[in-house]
Image (spheres, rainbow, N blue to C red):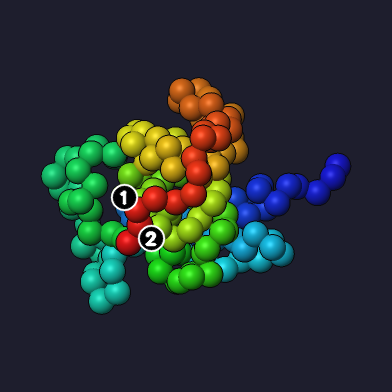
């Protein structure tokens, strides 16, 4: 039995990072890895902003309003794992790979693009496909590690268009 791949190694770490989450619905973890030496640049997990009570203490507003996952994400008080990892990484995210145990939402996909991430690896589908579509459109390599993604209508890996030449736009 050989060693596990780098992708599976960092995805396992993302799963461990997710255990710090205070969300009652989903435990999400993200890891940003430098492309040169397979080193972790930053990690993040989902939870309320600093200074705010945690959902595990005050309850989930999405549950109180009976909102399904992937709908009206702006109602949620949590900062997503991908967003926290990007904030911790700063410019260290540039050119790196992000590992996340769920496919990024549309808002996170925009932040991932502006953070200079070149590759996203995830292992669970998200109901809203706009984030996935945006990453692919922007030429960011996207890969789903687990076979469950195919069952949810997602190819493994998602093909990245080869026609993109350089970056346009950006903040």
Identified at 17% across, 40% down, the residue is: 66
What is the quadrant of the N terminus in the image? top right
Mark-to-mark CA distance, 2 and 1? 9 Å
* Marks 2 and 1 in Cβ contact (< 8 Å): yes
Q: How busy is the neighbourhood of tag 1: few (under 14 within 10 Å), some, or many (20 plus)?
A: some
Question: Which residue is more in the foreground, 56 or 137?
Answer: 137
Q: Position of residue 128 (x, y in %)?
A: 32, 35
- Which residue extends farthest bottom? 51
> Based on the displayed image, in which of its 4 quarters is residue 65 positioned?
top left
Which of marks 1 and 2 precedes in the sequence? 2
Q: What residue did someone put label 1 on?
A: 107
Q: Nearer the viewer, residue 78 or 165?
A: 165
Crowding near the residue tagged with mark 2, few <14, some 14–19, many ≥20 C-alpha atoms within 10 Å: many
Determine the residue located farthest toward the front in the rendered image.
165
Q: Which residue is mark 2?
A: 83
Q: Secondary structure at mark 2?
A: helix
Residue 39 seen: yes
Q: Residue furthest left?
A: 65
Tell me the tag on residue 119: none
Residue 73 percent coordinates (x, y): 24, 47
Residue 144 appearing in the image: no
- In the rendered image, residue 144, in percent from the top left (x then y), is placed at 55, 37
Q: Going 45% across and 25% down the picture, which residue do you hit?
A: 152
Q: Is residue 129 left or right of residue 155?
A: left
């Amino acid at each position: 039995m050989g060693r596990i791949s780098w992708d599976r190694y960092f995805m396992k770490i993302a799963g461990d990072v997710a255990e710090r989450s205070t969300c009652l619905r989903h435990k999400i973890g993200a890891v940003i890895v430098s492309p040169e030496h397979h080193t972790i640049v930053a990690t993040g997990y989902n939870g309320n902003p600093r200074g705010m009570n945690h959902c595990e203490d005050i309850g989930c507003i999405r549950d109180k309003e009976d909102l399904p996952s992937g709908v009206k994400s702006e109602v949620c008080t949590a900062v997503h794992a991908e967003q926290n990892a990007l904030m911790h990484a700063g410019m260290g995210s540039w050119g790196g790979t992000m590992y996340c145990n769920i496919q990024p939402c549309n808002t996170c996909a925009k932040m991932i693009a502006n953070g200079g991430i070149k590759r996203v690896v995830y292992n669970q589908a998200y109901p809203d496909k706009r984030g996935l579509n945006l990453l692919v459109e922007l030429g960011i390599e996207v890969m789903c590690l687990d076979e469950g993604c195919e069952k949810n209508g997602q190819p493994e890996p998602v093909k990245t268009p080869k026609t993109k030449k350089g970056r346009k736009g950006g903040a």
